[in-house]
Amino acid sequence: AVDHLQIARELGPLIESCSDEIERIRDLPDNLFERLIEHDLFRLVQPRDYGGAEVSPLEIVRFIEEIGRHDASTAWCLGQNNICGAIAAWMEPDAAREVFSSPRQILAWGPGPGEAHAVPGGYRLSGRFDFASGSRHATWLGAHVPVYLADGSRKPAVDGSTTPYTLLFPRESVEVKDTWQVIGLKGTGSDSYVVEDLFVPEHRVVARHLSTPRRVAGRLYALTQSNLYASSFSGLALGIARAYIDDFVGRMRDTIPRGAARSRGHNHVVQSKVGQSEARLRSARAFLYETVEEIWSTVQSGADPSLDELVRLRLASTWATQQAREIIADLYLAAGALAIFESQPFERRFRDIHTVAQQIQGHAAHFETCGQILMGMKPDRSMFTF
């Protein structure tokens, strides 16, 4: 079996050497992208039936965490593009082979208002979609929209619900807008795209609802893409925090402030912050890893995850992301003026982790949802099931 974690470690120096360029061009540079393709690192979550590695959930978390230690934008793109590829498990085989025909066939998508209307042979799609991470090197894009039949009624899912469908189409068939002017995760190129009355054939209209039978046997796909996004992006947050602590310790140990006799590392506040940060990071990581392993054990047994397990996964992933953000915010303040310089390894990670924590998968609002369920209430469960 391919050791993707070891590959991530070996690529670490190259990724770090590209980090300034990644930030500047707001994309992955060609030399790095080609190495990722060479190691087939955009198909880790795709079904084996279509050339993917179909790794376990914990493997993708570990992989993204390791890449995140070296560059957050690279890790985010790999997480996003890989998990988009899991949709192949719900696609008609011929359509999956069309979209995912080689390691260079990469899918990206983003949310946005839009709709599709039935016409002979398929649907006409219109809308604007944003936050399409990894779209600059993608070959395919997707849209999650309500679908309307010829009589104007909403096309239901298998269980009768009105969950959106996903339509897939070549990137070159739509207008991509350079909108990614942001403070963090700059290198993800999470642009917007506009679709105007685009014909999408029936075979590239995908239902990925829980009620939709999967077309491959792999137990990985008993988890939703939302479950995989949550766990992998929280792994990324842990990777950013791990690198931040390590660099903080090195700089504080070796830097002697002006007018001081000893390094910053001798400051009692700095020492306490390091100890607390290490404890918080390791406990958050342990909670995430334990939860991912538990839910994977359940699905490997042939069962679908219970609501209790999905709540724990959402709690663990959100907690990991928010703890990573708090750790970095505390250490940023403790580093003093040193932290504001672009020449130091602090300010970019500070911006990146705050951007990660703003994204829906790691947003603190999930604590409220989980708390309601734990108290026996019935909140919106869409973040657990789609």
Image: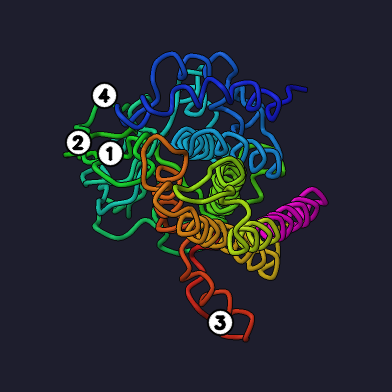
| Within-10-Å neighbours for mark 1: few <14, some 14–19, many 20+ | many
Give amino acid for label 4: Glu
Q: Which residue is mark 4?
A: 172
Between 69 and 89, the one nearer to me in the picture: 69
Q: Which residue: 44% across, 51% down?
A: 356
Instruction: Looking at the image, tell me whether mark 1 or mark 4 is earlier in sequence order.
Output: 4
SS for dot 3: helix
Pointer 4 with pointer 2, Cβ within 8 A? no
CA distance for labels 1 and 2 = 6 Å
Region of the chain picked out in magenta, as a range? 281-302
CA distance for labels 4 and 2 = 12 Å
CA distance for labels 1 and 4 = 14 Å
Q: Is residue 63 magenta?
A: no
Q: Main secondary structure of the magenta part?
A: helix
Instruction: Looking at the image, tell me whether mark 3 or mark 2 is earlier in sequence order.
Output: 2
User: From the image, which quarter does the N terminus lie in?
Assistant: top right
Closest to the camera, between mark 4 and mark 2, is 2
Give amino acid for label 1: Asp
Pointer 1 with pointer 2, Cβ within 8 A? yes
SS for dot 1: strand
Q: Which residue is mark 2?
A: 177
Residue 191: assigned label: 1
CA distance for labels 3 and 4 = 44 Å
Between 130 and 3, the one nearer to me in the picture: 3
Give amino acid for label 3: Gln
Q: Which residue is mark 3?
A: 372
Q: Is residue 287 magenta?
A: yes
